[in-house]
Every structure is written in structure tokens, then in C-alpha cells.
Amino acid sequence: MCTVIIQVPDSPEGIVRILAVRDEDPGRPWQPLGAWWPETYPGVVGVRDVRAGGAWMAADPVRGQVAVMLNRPDSLDVAPRSLESRGGLVLESVAGRSPRAPRTAGFNLVEVTGPSVTVTTWDGDSVGIEELVPGTHMLEHHDVDDPGSARITRWLPEFRDAAPQGDGLHDAWWGDWAAVLERSGKLSPGDDAAIIRDNRAHGYPTLSLLACVASVSRDAADVRFAPLQTPGEWNALDFVPPVQPE
């Protein structure tokens, strides 16, 4: 039940701003934002899923490409082991190859190319593509700006009021959005409206583990990450650039 907040600019010369919170099973190993695929995806950085080898979030900083994956309910009636990892689609997306015939479980895939943002959805029956209009949007495991989501209903107005500060690609723009995230952290992590979450109360083994911020212009992207010290519990976030793998 990850959460993504996106501000889409109203000009082709503008900058997309993204705040993404990752929920995952704490027992599933992962590697922080870094260049983990130098041979197959040179220049790409991402948060790597060690088990399947793909990414939850990835970016090509030179080409101005970012992609983030969120799970979505689906109608599939197949054994999970027969499906491909959704994380591979994230890497393919930032390489310029959006999914068209996925062999995965359901998803919402946020795809950013320069100032353009689309959300590609897969529910087991059909692929949908929605281009986001200028403004601030919020997404979790159903539709964009879903009015049936307690999380979105509670916090989207605050994210819209808390406009990112600064107009440069590398500005530390996220302070006001992080303040909204901090206020949300005062809720119980099992609350339907919580963003920093413990989804075990809802029957899932996932908790919020980390957050990433990204700025994307026409020809470049700046991406940073910050882990939570304890899964499912808020702490002040210190966003840092990608690590350099040894």
C-alpha cells in the first residue's frame, strides 16, 4: 500500500515533483537508491529488490525519466510463482519501454518523462493509461485522487496547499511536503488514513520502510532517498543522493 504524491507543472519548461513512500515486508531484502544494474541498465539508479532483482523506484537522471511501482488489486487467478516481477517493469519504463502486455500481478505504474506524467494501470484484464493534468495528485493502490481512499481524502488537500519550494532541479524543495508527512505520522500506523503505515492490521505483512523525492525536468532528474529508522514509525527524513555501489 505505497503512497505517491505528484505535482505536475503547467508548463513544458516546468519541473515535476514527486514524494513516494514505500511499503514492503521488512523481511524482504532491498538495497537503497543506487546504480545496481550497470550492464543491463547503464546510468539507471533505483531502490533494488534483492529477491527479484527489479526496482520499486528507478530513474535515469540524464534522460529525465522516473518510474514508481504501486500494487493494485487484480482479477488474476494464477499461482504467484507463474508471474513475472513487477519491478522489472520499472526498469524497462525508465529505459523507454512502457508495459503493454504485462505478465505480472496488478499495478499502478507512475511514469515520468520530462514534465509529462502518466499512470499505467493493470488489473488483470486490461491496461489503462492516464495522463495527469497540471496540479497535485495522490495515488495508492486504486485510482488517481481516489475519493474512496481515506488516505487521499485526508491528506491530498494539505499536499495541494503545501506547494514545493524553489524552482530549480536540485533545490531542497520538499520541506512543506515532509511537514505534511510528519503530521500524518501522528496517526496510528494501522489507521486507514495513515501514510506511514503498518498494514498488518489490514491483513498484509508490509510496513512503510523508506521515502524518496524526485525532481524531473525536460532533460534531467534528481532523485534522493531516506530510510525510516524503524519500519512503520515516523522519523525526520534526511534525503540523500544515490549511493555508489562498490
Image (cartoon, rainbow, N blue to C red):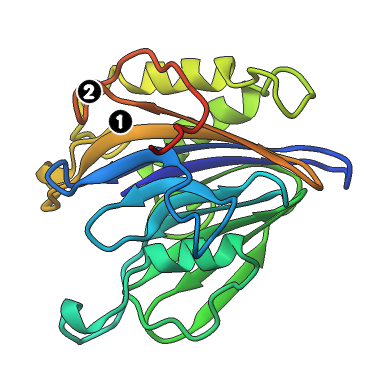
Q: 115 left or right of 119?
A: right
In the rendering, at what x and y percent does residue 205 appear?
12, 49
Q: How many marks?
A: 2
Residue 147 shows up from this direction = no
Q: Secondary structure at mark 2?
A: loop
| Label 1 neighbour load within 10 Å: few <14, some 14-19, many 20+ | many
Q: Is residue 33 above or below residue 128?
A: above
CB atoms at circles 1 and 2 under 8 Å apart? yes
* Residue in front for this viewpoint, 87 or 186: 87
Amino acid type shown at disc 2: Glu
In the rendering, at what x and y percent does residue 95 appear?
61, 64
Quadrant holding the C terminus: top left
Amino acid type shown at disc 1: Ile
Residue 151 shows up from this direction = yes
Please report the residue visible at 27 percent of the width from the left and 80 percent of the height from the top. 83
Q: Is residue 142 above or below residue 230?
A: below
* Residue in front for this viewpoint, 184 or 231: 231
Please report the residue visible at 15 percent of the width from the left and 83 percent of the height from the top. 79
In the rendering, at what x and y percent does residue 191 appear?
22, 34
* Residue in front for this viewpoint, 104 or 41: 41
Q: Earlier in the sequence, mark 1 or mark 2?
A: 1
Instruction: Write down the residue under mark 2.
Output: 233
Please report the residue visible at 19 percent of the width from the left and 23 percent of the height from the top. 230
The residues bearing labels 1 and 2 have C-alpha atoms spaced at a distance of 7 Å
Q: Residue furthest front?
A: 246
In the rendering, at what x and y percent does residue 225 appear?
45, 30
Q: Secondary structure at mark 1?
A: loop
Query: Which corner quadrant of the image does residue 71 belong to?
Result: bottom left
| Label 2 neighbour load within 10 Å: few <14, some 14-19, many 20+ | some
Q: 209 left or right of 81?
A: right
Q: Which mark is residue 196?
A: 1
Query: Which corner quadrant of the image does residue 130 belong to?
Result: bottom right
